Amino acid sequence: MAQQLVTNFNGILLYRRDYRERDMLIKFLTAEYGKKMFFIRGARKRGFKMAAELLPFTMGEYVGDLRDQGLSYINSVKTVQYFEQISQDIELNAYATYIMSLIDVAYPDNQPVGQWFQQITSALQLIDQHVAPALVTNVVEIQLLGVFGVAPELRWCTVCGRQDLPFDYSESYGGLLCQQHWHLDPHRLHASQAALFYLRRFSVLDLAKVHSINVKPTTAKQLRHILDTIYDNSVGLHLKAKRFIDQMGSWYQPLQPRSQDD
């Protein structure tokens, strides 16, 4: 039997979709109940009272009629936080959209997501502050691998368990190979030790404790290659939001601050 509950909940707005002529469907990632789809009656009408509180890239505390089957309903908004920089900057927007797409695909609706609500909240807050959006996204990608059923061994060599030798990443062995066993996989990624260091570090990083992330551009590029390989070959996920980020690199040039002489 379907159950419903009128209660307070904390949510991150994942996306909005027009529905019928005047209504809207909005999906939230909630802290307490996982992803929920809400029917917002009259959301597209002029003068809709909750219009400002239900914009893209918002999170807050809401009162709603939550149902374990079908659509839920929002009764009122208690508090709301708007990620203004994300909404205004195309690069920040792209990374935030990709992160929210990942969590949307990773978990089915109505399933609690545990610590992921706080981790996604922290990721969006950092991106909104222009803190290394690409690297923050890498952290989310790495830590979601287990949810996607791909949990690479990043603690030690998958063959012998050693931790004191240089590593490389092996798709065939599902994780790290120490230097003694590189010969077992001629198709290992030949990744740099710096890139593997951050791959391992990011796999356990709590974004709520992060204030800055500094990685050399060459290392960040190698880390991006490792993750693209894993997501393409092991996860098999090709999201539209990720393709946009890849294409953006060929044309996007962020505006530089004007000097006093300009």
Image (spheres, rainbow, N blue to C red):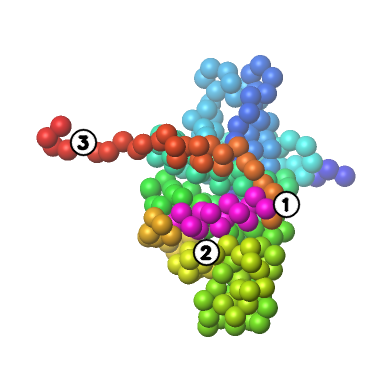
Within 10 Å of the Cα at label 1, are there few (<14), some (14-19), or many (20+) other Cα atoms? some
The extreme right residue here reads 1
Distance between the alpha carbons at the discs numbered 2 and 1 = 36 Å
Going by the numbered disc 3, the residue's amino acid type is Arg
Residue 53 is a magenta residue: no
Judged left or right of residue 74, residue 221 is left
Q: Secondary structure at mark 2?
A: loop
Within 10 Å of the Cα at label 2, are there few (<14), some (14-19), or many (20+) other Cα atoms? some
Is residue 4 shown to the viewer in this render? no
Going by the numbered disc 1, the residue's amino acid type is Gln
Q: Residue at x 13, y 37 (%)?
A: 260
Is residue 195 shown to the viewer in this render? yes
Q: Residue at x 58, y 62 (%)?
A: 189
Q: Which of the two marks, 1 or 3, is nearer to us in this view? A: 3
Residue 116 drawn at (x, y percent)? 60, 56
In magenta, the rendered stretch is 220-233
Residue 170 drawn at (x, y percent)? 63, 66
Query: Which disc number belongs to residue 125?
Result: none
Please tell me which residue lies in front, 177 or 155.
177
Residue 223 is a magenta residue: yes
Which mark is first along the chain, 3 or 1?
1
The extreme left residue here reads 261
Residue underneath mark 1: 111
Residue underneath mark 2: 191
Which mark is first along the chain, 2 or 3?
2
Q: Secondary structure at mark 1?
A: loop
Q: Which of the two marks, 2 or 1, is nearer to us in this view? A: 2
Query: Which disc number belongs to residue 258?
Result: 3
The answer to whether residue 191 is above or below residue 62 is: below
Residue 56 drawn at (x, y percent)? 52, 34
The answer to whether residue 102 is above or below residue 187 is: above
Going by the numbered disc 2, the residue's amino acid type is Ala
